[in-house]
Image: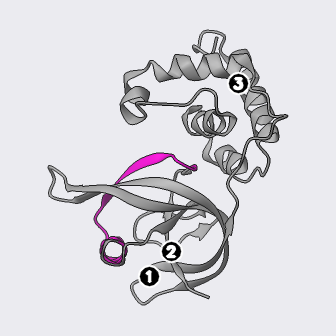
């Protein structure tokens, strides 16, 4: 089985989610160079224990296969890349290369698909539309399909202010209606913690 390079992060990348990264460690420069040369992606995964920099951390077993959709040289002369999540993956056997880059055997997990029984709660649609008015969100995602249960679910997973471990749990959910119910519970909790937080 082919080994895929792994990029451990202190964040969770969801399907179709976009993230900008600043690359400066040699192992990740090598990763980006190889991916761009051979036109393949890599896997991002949340760090369970350890650090992003100068470490080989413990990682979760579910991550996201991503592709590089843009790159540029930053003002600080470091390499900047923009990645987009494509598909969830199960990380199996891992291997530490000589440059301390992690690679892994993976199995692709089917992305969530909407069923006819998946009904989008109007409150979730309203919240997504509200968040999309924010310049940061609209700049990152000019168009969001608010008729798609899966798109609303994954965008809210990314944007809601919850801890990374909870975002990881959301990434691991295998059914759209369950994910939507989890999000409604989270939003209710956030509203109760701070009625003025804008989730109205």
Q: Is residue 21 left or right of residue 42?
A: left
Q: Position of residue 83 (x, y in %)?
A: 41, 55
C-alpha gap between disc 3 and disc 1 = 39 Å
Asked which quadrant contains residue 64, the reply is: bottom right
Residue 17 included in the magenta stretch of the image: yes
Residue highlighted by disc 1: 100
Q: Secondary structure at mark 3?
A: helix
**Mark positioned earlier in the residue sequence (1 or 2):** 2
Q: Residue furthest right?
A: 117
For marks 2 and 3, the one nearer the N-term is: 2
Near mark 1 (Cα within 10 A), the count class, few <14, some 14-19 or many ≥20, is some
Q: Which residue does the image show at 43% across and 34% down from the upper left?
A: 141
Could you give the CA–CA distance between mark 1 and mark 2, rounded to whole angstroms?
A: 7 Å
Q: Residue 151 appears at what percent x and percent y?
A: 61, 37
- Picture coordinates of residue 62, whole percent (x, y): 67, 63
Residue 197: assigned label: none
Tell me the residue that label 2 is attached to: 56
Element class at badge 1: loop
SS for callout 2: loop
Q: Are marks 1 and 2 in contact (CB under 8 Å)?
A: yes
User: Which residue does the numbered mark 3 point to in the structure image?
Assistant: 187
Name the residue located 54 percent from the left edge and 57 percent from the top edge: 86
- The type of colouring in the image is one colour
| Residue 23 belongs to magenta span | yes
* Picture quarter with the N terminus: bottom right
What segment carries the magenta color? 14-35
Q: Earlier in the sequence, mark 3 or mark 1?
A: 1
């Amino acid at each position: 089985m082919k080994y895929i390079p792994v990029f451990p992060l202190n964040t969770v990348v969801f399907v179709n989610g976009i993230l900008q990264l600043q690359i400066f460690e040699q192992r990740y420069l090598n990763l980006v160079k190889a991916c761009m040369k051979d036109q393949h992606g890599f896997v991002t995964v949340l760090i369970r224990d350890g650090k992003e920099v100068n470490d080989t951390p413990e990682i979760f077993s579910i991550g996201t296969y991503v592709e590089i959709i843009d790159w540029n040289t930053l003002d600080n002369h470091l390499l900047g890349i923009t990645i987009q999540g494509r598909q969830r993956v199960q990380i199996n056997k891992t291997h530490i290369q000589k440059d301390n880059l992690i690679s892994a055997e993976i199995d692709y997990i089917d992305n969530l698909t909407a069923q006819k029984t998946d009904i989008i709660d109007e409150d979730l649609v309203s919240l997504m539309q509200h968040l999309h008015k924010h310049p940061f969100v609209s700049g990152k995602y000019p168009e969001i399909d608010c008729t798609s249960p899966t798109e609303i679910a994954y965008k809210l997973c990314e944007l809601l202010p919850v801890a990374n471990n909870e975002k990881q749990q959301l990434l691991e959910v295998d059914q759209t209606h369950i994910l939507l119910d989890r999000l409604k519970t989270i939003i209710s909790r956030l509203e109760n913690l701070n009625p003025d937080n804008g989730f109205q």
